[in-house]
Image: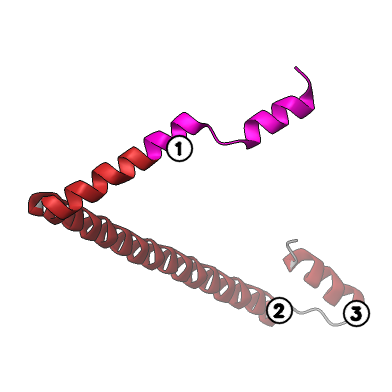
């Protein structure tokens, strides 16, 4: 079997599969029109799935937003503390010339 014949074979529709799909569609259509219980269950199931999806999406968004906000606040608090520590180091320093100031900067700089 060549690659071309396999490709042609895979792109054609299987007639038995199409018949089964049509039969399934007819059965569902007949049940929908004849059974109130089937319609009620299908509508309830659809609405339940929609509610679960909406609730899950909302909760996922809220959790992600809260995690981001908490982490942002934590990073900002850490940076304020670090800035205060560096400022205290500079305030307590008695560096007077350029080399001493540069040494102080190098000692406080953490890459």
Q: Badges 3 and 1: C-beta atoms under 8 Å apart?
A: no
Q: Quick one: 83 or 6, which is closer to the camera?
A: 6
The image shows residue 52 at horizontal and vertical percentages of: 27, 57
Give the residue drawn at x 53%, y 32%.
Answer: 14
As for residue 7 lying within the magenta part, the answer is yes
Q: Which residue is mark 3?
A: 98
Q: Residue at x 75, y 66 (%)?
A: 109
Q: Secondary structure at mark 2?
A: helix
- The residue sitting at 54% across, 68% down in the picture is 75
63 w.r.t. 10: above or below: below
Measured in 3D between alpha carbons, the distance from the residue under mark 2 to the one under mark 3, in whole angstroms, is 13 Å
Left or right side of 102 for 80: left
| Image quarter hosting the C terminus | bottom right
Identify the residue at the far top of this view: 1
Provide the secondary structure element on which disc 3 rests. Answer: helix
Q: Residues under labels 3 and 1: Cα distance?
A: 85 Å
Q: Earlier along the polypeptide chain: callout 3 or callout 1?
A: 1
Q: Secondary structure at mark 1?
A: helix
Query: In this image, 5 relative to 81: left or right?
Result: right
Are there few (<14), some (14-19), or many (20+) residues within 10 Å of tag 3? Answer: few
Magenta region: 1-21
Question: Which circle, 1 or 2, is nearer the viewer?
Answer: 1
């Amino acid at each position: 079997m060549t690659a071309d014949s396999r490709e042609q074979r895979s792109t054609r529709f299987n007639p038995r599969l199409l018949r089964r799909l049509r039969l399934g569609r007819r059965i569902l259509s007949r049940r929908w029109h004849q059974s109130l219980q089937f319609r009620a269950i299908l509508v309830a199931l659809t609405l339940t799935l929609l509610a679960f999806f909406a609730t899950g999406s909302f909760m996922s968004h809220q959790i992600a937003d809260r995690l981001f906000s908490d982490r942002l606040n934590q990073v900002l608090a850490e940076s304020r503390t670090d800035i205060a520590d560096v400022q205290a180091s500079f305030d307590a320093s008695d560096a007077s010339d350029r080399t001493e100031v540069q040494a102080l900067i190098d000692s406080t700089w953490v890459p």
